[in-house]
Image (spheres, rainbow, N blue to C red):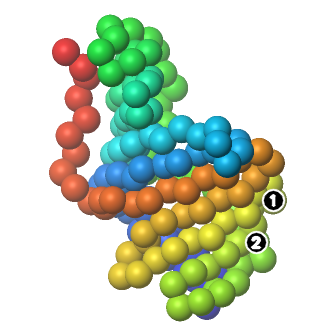
């Protein structure tokens, strides 16, 4: 049943037209960045680091800038299928409470804790010098990513 729960998460995530989340990624208790991500099918995504760099990727094109007020720079990009989950394999899967499933992805290697209520609400990851928390804020909203002006 727990492997089926991870599979349900992957299917739900990949099957969403879009996924939005806020990610806190840290290498220590004091060294962290906060980024807002938006993933859209079939191959679009954007990110905005709080007070820092931003990017928009649409298929084979990409735009980056160093700051929220910087000038966009266009470059080629290998198309990446979206929405994509941040792990490849789930092993040692355990449901540790009504709302938490934990597992390991040995290919990273990393430990994950998936929190869910009626839908996924957060994904915690711990790997070597990486402490990540993704807080999901929206699934399936209308696609809206466009090239910057």
Which is nearer the eye, 38 or 3? 38
Q: What percent of the width, then of the height, locates residue 78?
A: 51, 26
Q: Quadrant of residue 119?
A: bottom left
Q: Residue at x 71, y 45 (%)?
A: 28
Q: Residue at x 45, y 40 (%)?
A: 35
In 3D space, how far apart are the residues under numbered discs 1 and 2 (Cα atoms)? 8 Å
Residue at label 1?
A: 106
Callout count: 2
Count neighbours of disc 2 (C-alpha within 10 A) and say few if under 14, some if 14 to 19, many if 20 or more.
Answer: few
Above/below status of 99 relative to 61: below
Residue at label 2?
A: 91
For the residue labelled by badge 2, is the local secondary structure a helix, a strand or a loop?
Answer: strand
Q: Are marks 1 and 2 in contact (CB under 8 Å)?
A: yes
Q: Residue at x 80, y 54 (%)?
A: 109
Q: On the picture, is 111 further left or further right than 70?
A: right
Q: What percent of the width, then of the height, locates residue 20?
A: 35, 52
Q: On the picture, is 72 further left or further right than 87?
A: left
Q: On the picture, is 12 further left or further right than 78?
A: left
Q: What percent of the width, then of the height, locates residue 122?
A: 48, 66
Above/below status of 105 relative to 58: below
Q: Residue at x 61, y 52 (%)?
A: 132
Q: Quadrant of residue 105?
A: bottom right
Q: What percent of the width, then of the height, locates residue 27?
A: 70, 42
Q: Quadrant of the N terminus?
A: bottom right
Q: Between disc 1 and disc 2, whose residue precedes? A: 2
Which is nearer the eye, 90 or 21? 21
Above/below status of 51 relative to 111: above
Tag shown at residue 65: none
The residue lying furthest to the front in this view is 30
Which is nearer the eye, 68 or 37? 68
């Amino acid at each position: 049943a727990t492997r089926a729960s991870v599979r349900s998460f992957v299917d739900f995530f990949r099957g969403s037209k879009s996924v939005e989340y806020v990610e806190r990624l840290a290498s220590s208790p004091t060294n962290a960045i906060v980024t807002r991500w938006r993933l859209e099918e079939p191959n679009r995504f954007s990110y905005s680091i709080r007070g820092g760099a931003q990017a928009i990727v649409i298929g084979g094109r990409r735009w980056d800038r160093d700051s929220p007020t910087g000038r966009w720079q266009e470059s080629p990009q290998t198309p990446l299928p979206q929405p994509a989950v941040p792990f490849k394999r789930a092993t040692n899967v355990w449901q540790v409470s009504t709302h938490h499933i934990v597992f390991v992805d040995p290919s990273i290697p990393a430990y994950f804790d998936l929190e869910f209520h009626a839908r996924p609400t957060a994904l915690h990851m711990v790997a070597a010098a990486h402490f990540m928390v993704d807080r999901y804020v929206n699934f399936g909203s209308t696609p809206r990513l466009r090239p910057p002006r």
